[in-house]
Image (cartoon, helix red, strand yellow):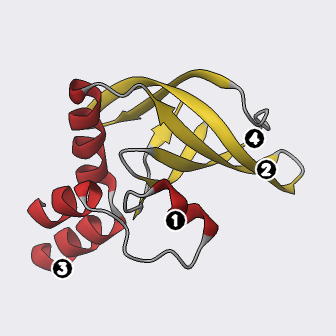
């Protein structure tokens, strides 16, 4: 779990993908939800979502991440949208004005729902 907490706090070394411009490492998520759909990956700075409805690029709105580790409400600004099909969109959001308390809640949710952490837990349980 400590590795996950360090990963979400570290800076991305990649840079090969345009999404890496956000600077923070993105962690793949499993079963983490938000008020708009499913969270596919998460960093301290933003997230990639799978939603049924499109977001308008450039628009900010309240956004709540929910999980067994609690919930956190943030302001999220849509930075890009891809229509994947009928009622299926992938949305990239940037979190605005994140407080230290919100950042800690994001880290706790990331540690709980990170796919690598879940896989480790399954292996340790076997």
Q: Mark 2 points at which residue?
A: 88
> Where is mark 4, residue-wise?
52
Asked whether disc 2 touches disc 1, contact meaning CB atoms under 8 Å apart, the reply is no
Tell me residue 22's x, y (percent). Answer: 49, 54
Secondary structure state at the residue bearing disc 2: strand
Q: Are marks 1 and 3 in contact (CB under 8 Å)?
A: no
* Observer-nearest of 115 and 23: 23
Badge nearest the viewer, 4 or 3: 4
The residue under the point 22% across, 28% down is 100
Q: Mark 3 or mark 1, which is nearer the start of the sequence?
A: 1
Residue found at x 53% / y 60% = 21
Of tags 2 and 1, the one toward the viewer is: 1
Q: Name the residue under label 3.
A: 123
Q: How crowded is mark 3: few (under 14 residues within 10 Å), some or many (20 or more)?
A: few
Name the quadrant of the N terminus.
bottom left
How would you rate the neighbour count of disc 4 (Cα within 10 Å): few for under 14, some for 14-19, many for 20 or more? some
Estimate the x, y position of residue 38 in percent, counting from the top left.
Answer: 56, 46
Which residue is found at the position 27% from the left and 65% from the top? Answer: 118
């Amino acid at each position: 779990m400590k590795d996950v907490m360090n990963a979400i706090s570290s800076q991305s070394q990649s840079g090969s993908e345009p999404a890496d411009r956000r600077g923070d490492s993105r962690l793949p998520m499993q079963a983490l939800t938000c008020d708009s759909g499913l969270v596919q990956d998460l960093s301290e700075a933003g997230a990639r979502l799978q939603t049924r409805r499109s977001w308008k690029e450039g628009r900010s709105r309240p956004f709540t991440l929910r999980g067994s580790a609690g919930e956190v409400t943030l302001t999220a600004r849509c930075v890009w949208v891809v229509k994947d099909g009928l009622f299926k969109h992938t949305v990239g959001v940037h979190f605005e004005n994140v407080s230290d308390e919100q950042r800690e809640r994001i880290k706790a949710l990331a540690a709980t729902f990170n796919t690598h952490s879940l896989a480790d837990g399954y292996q340790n349980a076997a």
